[in-house]
Image: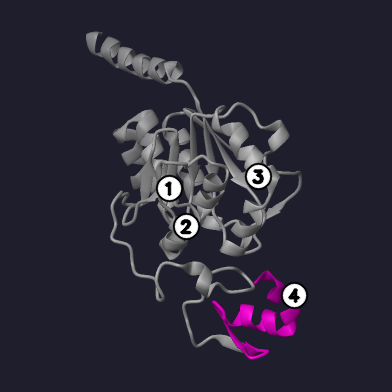
Amino acid sequence: MRMIFLVVSFFAGVAALYAQTPVVKVAVLLYPGMELQDFAGPADVFTKAAEITRGGYQVYTVSMKQGVVYTEGHVGIQPDYTIRQLPETDVLVIPGAPMAVIDSLRKDSTMRTLIKQYQDSVSVVMSVCTGAYLLAEAGLLDHQKATTHYFVADDFAEAFPGIAVVKDVRYVDEGNIVTTAGVTAGIDGALHLVERYSGDRIAGMVARGMQYTPHREEVWPQAPTGMNGKGDADLVCGMVAIDKNVYAEYKGRRYYFCGGTCKKAFLSNPGKYIPRL
């Protein structure tokens, strides 16, 4: 009887623990052209954390306006909410995108207002990859440390001299602001937040469930022409054109592309892309 009592008491204690733990509400911002893994990686981390903690996390997506949002690879996602409908949120995740998309959003006053608006109403704002540009443009990173995709690290430092860019890391934690390096580093940043909210045991269970080995420090690879992705940006998709064998000549100038698909799109209508320069 005593053994049964102890078992029942144990499970009752576990249930009480989860019941007393506040639910962490996570909103992932969606916008046209965002990098798919920037969104999917953190969302998966928090979703698995919700399963392991029996509802200790709520994850939802939010967009600027109603309707399906198409990612960089044209994968359609139906957001749960628009910004006007967004419920109370603890963590706001802002994915990155190719630089052509980011440059456009940096000029978007609505995006800047949105980020500033939620700076004080959420506990943590986390950017993934080039999403750091959007936080910096809104003034959230002034006089702080931050990181971003290694391809554009030097450009980021030049664009925002008041920000201390940290290299060779997967994420930077400044308390209410977390910035991560490129793409999959968003998983590390999200796991770090799960550890902050739920402890290293839960974070470890999530990582094992994803068959992922998290780490904070990492020696960055060297970009082919330095860490200024803009100088080698594909005019069509905005990605860095690594392969210098994929290019097209137009009006006496050479343009590089990430692959044959973008090169073909450019050649079909060069005037559509040249004005971006």
Disc 1: which residue: 163
The answer to the question of whether label 4 and label 2 lie on touching residues, with beta carbons closer than 8 A, is: no
Q: Calculate the distance from the C-alpha at mark 1 to the C-alpha at mark 2.
A: 9 Å
Q: Is residue 66 left or right of residue 223?
A: right
Q: Please, what is the three-letter code of the amino acid marked with disc 4? A: Lys
- Looking at the rendering, which quadrant does residue 250 occupy? bottom right
Check disc 3 and report its element: helix, strand or loop: helix
Q: Earlier in the sequence, mark 1 or mark 2?
A: 2
Disc 4: which residue: 272
The residue carrying pointer 3 sits among few (fewer than 14), some (14 to 19) or many (20 or more) residues within 10 Å by Cα, namely: some
Q: Earlier in the sequence, mark 4 or mark 2?
A: 2
The answer to the question of whether label 1 and label 2 lie on touching residues, with beta carbons closer than 8 A, is: yes
Q: Earlier in the sequence, mark 1 or mark 4?
A: 1
| Percent coordinates x, y for residue 210 in the rendering | 39, 49
Q: Is residue 240 visible?
A: no
Q: Calculate the distance from the C-alpha at mark 3 to the C-alpha at mark 2.
A: 18 Å
The residue carrying pointer 4 sits among few (fewer than 14), some (14 to 19) or many (20 or more) residues within 10 Å by Cα, namely: few
Given this view, does label 1 or label 4 mark the residue nearer the observer? 1
Instruction: Specify whether residue 255 is painted magenta.
Output: yes
Disc 3: which residue: 111
Q: Please, what is the three-letter code of the amino acid marked with disc 2? A: Phe
The residue lying at 54 percent from left, 54 percent from top is: 96
Disc 2: which residue: 156
Which residues make up the magenta segment? 249-277
